[in-house]
Amino acid sequence: MKNGMAAFPSRVGCWFLCGCAGAADTDSFPEETGIESDGSADSDGPADSEGSETGSLDSDTAASAPYCAITETWIECPHQELGIPLFGEASDRRVFYAEPLGEPPADGWPYVLLFQGSYFPAENFWSAEPGVPWGGWYQALAVAALLDAGFAVITPETRYSGSTFWDTNVSPWNVAWTTSGDHSLMLEIFDRIEAGEFGALDTDQAFAAGLSSGGYMTSRMAVSYPGRFQALAIHSASYATCIGSLCALPALPEDHPPTLFLHGELDDIVPVWTMTAYADVLSEQGTAVEVSVDAESGHEWIAEDPQRLRDWFIAHGS
């Protein structure tokens, strides 16, 4: 593994789709992301919320002070953690979350569920340094961009503290989803959102995104929870039950949410054609689709993703 980090499972594990990425290009910080740096690495908590304009889905609206501490060498986004016990699992599933600065709108904050990729725990959404694997720097910047745009962010974790992958495309749960632990987790998350345990959230303003295994899990939101999400963003992945180049598309839900597809042309783990096949079928059936393929990227978050993700969800909010 690059950059002195502890070794992750081998490429064999990428059968369930983890990923790989190079270092972040810090020369382009922060212009390519559209995120302002506050010049401080202080991570004791979010900045003072006085005068904040968060809570609006207007793309010109952002908090007067950024939620996350961002410098050229570190991102830190304060967050909370909730443990969810599931029957048959030895340890609680961790779910990390944060609300934007300021007072929530009358109906609550719109919220985004962000699903981790394989072996890259969900806690890594909340802090990063340049060069972490799979574009983790830009993944954390995406969290910062969403919070500053007025979205609450929730990042659930896979089994064993995020050291595994989502069930969505793994036998037998790929064809028997309601028997999976991840389905039980999602039902618990939905119930706890309704109960206000993740803060003041608008249950009619739900969005989801993820990379690799998390991208397949994002597709699962359309397949198994119809009508719940207003828009999705699927990164370096395809339909919920596909695995890499093994990808056969069934009939897609007619009410499939509008979907942004992000992919690297050089992705050798999830071939780009599996994504375009999915996007083409959605487009043919009249679902709003946007496809962004980066010619120089592989299986990773890239610099433009934070703004694209934010803008897509703003455009499809109500």
Image (cartoon, helix red, strand yellow):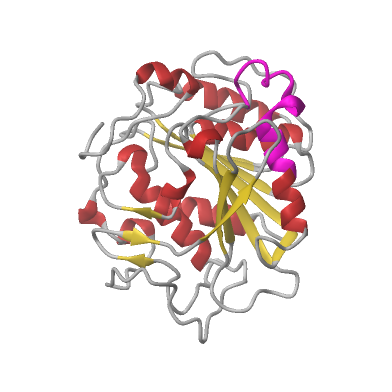
Question: How many tags in the picture?
Answer: 0
On the picture, is 270 further left or further right than 101? left
Q: Percent from the top left, x then y, of residue 227?
A: 79, 44
Q: Residue at x 45, y 61 (%)?
A: 144
Residue 234 image-quadrant placement: top right
On the picture, is 158 further left or further right than 318? left
Mark yes or no: residue 303 visible: no
Q: Percent from the top left, x then y, of residue 5?
A: 26, 39
Q: Residue at x 35, y 37 (%)?
A: 134
Residue 174 image-quadrant placement: top right
Task: Judge whether 261 appears above or below 152 on screen.
Answer: above
Q: Residue at x 62, y 44 (%)?
A: 232
Q: Quadrant of the C terminus?
A: bottom right
Task: Judge whether 288 appears above or below 52 on screen.
Answer: above
On the picture, is 43 further left or further right than 166? left
Query: Which segment is the magenta one?
Result: 168-187
Q: Percent from the top left, x then y, of residue 136?
A: 36, 45
